[in-house]
Image: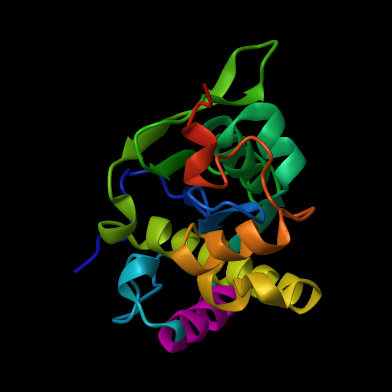
Amino acid sequence: MLLSKFSDFSLECGTDEAGRGCLAGPVTAAAVILKPDFKSDLLNDSKQVSEKNRNILRKKIEEEALCFKVVHIMMDKIDELNILHASIFGMHEAIKGLSSTPEFIAVDGNKFKPFYLNKSKNQVIPHECVVKGDAKYLNIAAASILAKTHRDEFMAKIHEEFPHYNWKSNKGYPTREHRNAIREFGSSAYHRKSFKLLPEQLKMKF
């Protein structure tokens, strides 16, 4: 049974991202503030929930949450910042987009940067990083579901543009099929240039 939130603050947002380990497509971040009476027996870490149930949960979360925001951080920004900083940047952008300002931020994972309400006055929203938080707290799990479903939807759309990579199925992750397609067709505008797209990129020629 997941706990509703980490802190005693009334307005706590959960935040998470999807797509960090992918070779192509954005990293997608979400932030969610749930109402105190939000309940769901289905809600869990998005990786533990079937695609059908993820889509059911997405509809429920978007209809019943106090507020939510989802953002895509595109490949050029990932290449500019690196994937860790792009993921944190995405979570910050999602939090900024919430219609209610959170009093506390519960973050999935072990890395985050302070979120300032007013940097000149050193006003910061307190946060806590929770390893595997998407399997412990409803608000982080909800953010996980939104990030995953919105990113999957994006990858299905760009699959139509480049069907030979089969992003509809592999979602841009480094599967054998995806890497074989990169060998055959080269990279696309949606591939992350800073990522090692093929294992042989590590090999040095003498």
- Residue at position x 58%, y 43% in the image: 91
| Left or right, residue 135 beside residue 145 | left
Q: Is residue 24 visible?
A: yes
Overall secondary structure of the magenta section: helix
Magenta stretch: residue 161 in it? no
Q: Which residues are magenta?
A: 52-64
Q: Quadrant of residue 117?
A: top right
Which is nearer the eye, 32 or 80?
80
Q: Is residue 59 magenta?
A: yes
**In front here: 101 or 46?**
46
Q: Position of residue 139 (x, y in %)?
A: 41, 59
Residue 1 placement, left or right of 77: left
The vertical placement of 182 against 81, above or below, is below
116 in relation to 102, above or below: above
* Residue 10: x %, y % from top left: 43, 50
Query: Does residue 177 appear left or right of residue 193 in this picture?
Result: left
**Picture layout, residue 141 above or below residue 94:** below
| Residue 110: image location, x then y, percent | 34, 34
Q: Quadrant of residue 169?
A: bottom right
The color scheme shown is: rainbow
